[in-house]
Amino acid sequence: MERSHSDSRTRRLRALADLVRAEMLTSQEEATERLADQGFAVTQATVSRDLEQLGAVKVKRGGVLSYALPDQIGAADWSTGRLARILSEWALSVEAAGQLIVMKTPPGSAHLVASAIDQSALPEIAGTVSGDDTLFLVVRDGHAIPPLVRRFERMMGQEKINYA
């Protein structure tokens, strides 16, 4: 039974991702209707959770605000200001851990922050790995980690004050 539920959820997520890529879905209600047209009986609340899991965000394309997946958003759209807004809203903490940087987020949000960092194409970051509420940033060789941590803290609005 659990396997069947998981399989149908996977098919629904794949269908929703295909819809977001193929059409300009402007609302969760519209996404719900389009999925119903394909035989998926879902509520708007389910579609909301699915869009969040896919990392879909609303972006303005052709003057219309519609959903887009992280891989549809070009690096030019992820300016430092936008990355700072995402970090200030979703990142809870940042710390160095050996040759990695570890960020904590609210449950279910690590993929959103990781995608924003990946799309920003920071030259110091080779890539990210995210779970549910934690992400790891892989720092390229030759880049010092403490200044990067301080930069992320500034973007998060959590810069530590040095009283020394």
Image: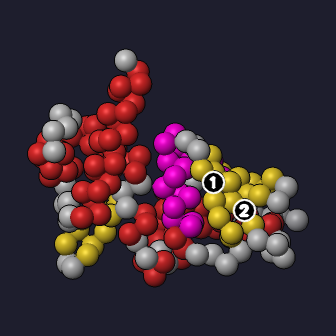
Give the amino acid at mark 2: Val
Please name the residue shown 36% across and 57% down the image.
56
Q: What residue did someone put label 2 on?
A: 138
Whether tag 2 and tag 1 are in contact, CB under 8 A, the answer is yes
Residue sitting nearer the eye, 128 or 87: 128
> Which label was assigned to residue 37?
none
Q: Quadrant of residue 140?
A: bottom right
**Would residue 8 appear left or right of 127 to someone viewing this image?**
left
In this picture, residue 77 sits left or right of residue 154: left
**Left or right, 89 with reference to 143:** left
Judge whether 16 appears above or below 39 on screen: below
Does 80 appear in magenta? no
Q: Work out whether residue 94 can be spotted.
A: no
Disc 1 residue type?
Val
**Quarter of the image where the N terminus is located:** top left
Across and down, in percent, residue 115 comes to: 51, 61
Residue closest to the eye, 13 or 74? 13
Secondary element under disc 1, as helix, strand or loop, is: strand
Please tell me how crowded label 1 is: few (under 14), some (14-19), or many (20+) other residues with Cα within 10 Å: some
The residue lying toward the viewer, choosing from 134 and 84, is 134
Magenta-highlighted residues: 103-118
Residue 108 drawn in magenta:
yes
Q: In terms of secondary structure, where does tag 2 sit?
A: strand
Q: Position of residue 57 (x, y in %)?
A: 35, 60
Q: Is residue 103 above or below residue 2?
A: below
Residue at horizontal 59 percent and vertical 44 percent from the top? 131
Q: Which residue is mark 1?
A: 129
Residue 71, percent from left and from top: 43, 66
What residue appears at the point 19 percent right and 50 percent down from the top-left corner?
Answer: 31
Q: Nearer the viewer, residue 144 or 85?
A: 144
**Dot 2 crowding, Cα within 10 Å, few <14, some 14–19, many 20+:** some
